[in-house]
Image (cartoon, rainbow, N blue to C red):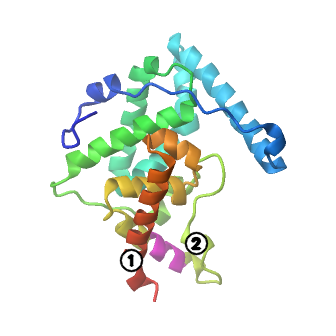
Amino acid sequence: MTDPERVYSAEELAAAAPPDEPEPAPAPDETLTPEQRAENARRAEQDRRDRQLVRRLKQGDEAAFRELVHTYQNRIFSLMLRMIGNRQEAEDLAQEVFIIVYRAIGNYRGEGRFYTWLYRVASNTCKNRIKYLKGRNFHRSLDIDETPQAQMPAAETGAVITFQSQVPGPEAVTEGMRMEKIVQRELAALDPDHRLLIVLRDVQGMSYQDIIKITGLQEGTLKSRLHRARLALKERLEPFMR
């Protein structure tokens, strides 16, 4: 997709789904901590399972597609909900992502992680929908406390950051939900590219390596943009933190 202002159809998005790219060589095992070795082993097992499902899907196995959807639907829904801020839109968009994946699975050659390829498709689809909604009388109606799917970790490591876990005492739930809604509202006011980086890194806890594969940014550019995005969000939240 080369035109930043154009809204694309689902068919065009499927045709333009990016091919996967080879993953960088992993660090030598002797340089890793026990936790990093365990994480690498878990990632390798997930990738092995995903490759099996993709191979079956390419052979026309509908059950493999259903299993892929079951594995990743909450993660993709969480991304869409945080980016769009409307439950119905997020549900519709998550369904559209998997339709696009089904049609574009031939672009996935198995050279990189299916997980990051799926997120690149989802990110492009989400940005396309944001362009479509821009300038329309679009109503964001997110109720964080009523959407437990949005609290699920989309990355394989760490947990989604919620204010419920940051506020101590019996008032934690009420105050936490209030702040969740404020954060979502102010997050929605950011530039979509900045919003995406904050959601991937700070909300869903993804590694820089995975975000680089998803966004195509260089590491220095990614960290610089993320820093600016955090500063912008912090400035918007300051009036509510006093």
Overall secondary structure of the magenta section: helix
Dot label at residue 82:
none
Q: Residue at x 41, y 35 (%)?
A: 121
| Percent position of residue 183, x then y | 43, 70
Q: Which element carries disc 2, helix, strand or loop? A: helix
Dot 1 crowding, Cα within 10 Å, few <14, some 14–19, many 20+: few
Who is closer to the viewer here, 88 or 7? 7
Q: Which residues are magenta?
A: 174-180
Disc 2 vs disc 1: Cβ atoms closer than 8 Å? no
x then y, percent, for residue 235: 38, 77
Residue plotted at (37% across, 48% down): 90
**Residue 216 percent across, percent down from the top left:** 44, 40
Label drawn at residue 164: 2
Q: Quadrant of residue 94?
A: top left
- Name the amino acid, label 1: Glu
Return the residue nearer the eye: 161 or 198.
198
Residue plotted at (33% across, 26% down):
16
Instruction: Indicate which label's residue lies in the foreground, 2 or 1.
Output: 1
Which image quarter: residue 240? bottom left
Q: Which residue is mark 1?
A: 235
Identify which amino acid the numbered label 2 is placed on: Gln
Q: Position of residue 44 (x, y in %)?
A: 71, 32
